[in-house]
Amino acid sequence: MKKIAVFASGSGSNFQAIVDAVKAGTLEADIRLLVCDQESAYVLQRAEKEKITSFCFSPKSFHDKAAFEQEIVKQLKSKDVEFIVLAGYMRLIGPTLLQEYPEAIVNIHPSLLPAFPGIDAIGQAFDAGVKVTGLSIHYVDAGMDTGPIIAQKEIEILENDTRDRLQERIQQAEHIVYPEVLQQLFMKEKSISSH
């Protein structure tokens, strides 16, 4: 069982999809911790309901990013976390976390990277008038959505799509694809480490 932490800043629908996949037995992972940087985020209620420990911090109460990331690392170590899953975490990961978890942090992003990195990728794609967008799952590096891509899924932008409708369709796809890709990653790692 891969011991993971999920990082989220908002409502936590991807967090919930991961929890549900673990409960259904389709994702072999043990969610040790939810890390959240917004005290009013709905994801904290989801974690409480699922009896998953959460660590919520206010970045403003720390001297700098290195200081709050050191605190996060302490929390992760205390729970034996091996792998970090970003699920709508709205902060760039800094060197402190990257050094502690090299090639063990993944993110999901609602566009076909490298197109439309950063915030409001769905709005960016919609405004650009592209016919196809989608989602990308990638390893996290020091840049903004620049890490090596693990998997992508294309989603067509329909004639009658509104920005909200497109967002809903991308999110529905994310909830299916993210747990599947995580499971494939963990299985691959397991077979490498057992050889």
Image: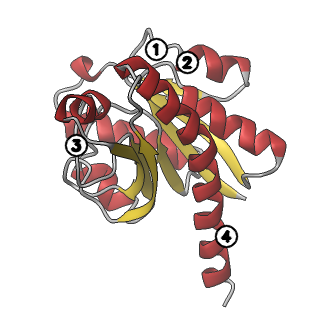
Residue at 66% x, 91% y is 195
Alpha-carbon span between mark 1 and mark 3: 25 Å
| Disc 2 target residue | 44
Q: What's the amino acid at mark 4?
A: Met
Q: Which mark is residue 116?
A: 3
Sequence-wise first label, 2 or 3? 2
Using the rendered view, name the quadrant where residue 17 is placed: top right
Residue at 45% x, 44% y is 155
Q: CA separation, marks 2 and 1?
A: 6 Å
Outermost residue on the front side: it is: 159
Q: Amino acid at mark 2?
A: Leu
Mark 3 falls on what kind of element? loop
Side of 160 relative to 33 (left or right): left
Contact check, label 2 and label 1, Cβ < 8 Å: yes
Q: Residues within 10 Å of mark 3 (few under 14, many from 20)?
A: some
86 w.r.t. 127: above or below: below
Which circle marks residue 187 in the picture? 4
> In the image, which is nearer the foreground, mark 4 or mark 2?
4
**Pair 1/3: label in front:** 3
Secondary structure beneath disc 4? Answer: helix
Task: Tell me the kind of residue under disc 1.
Answer: Ala
- Which disc, if any, is residue 41? 1
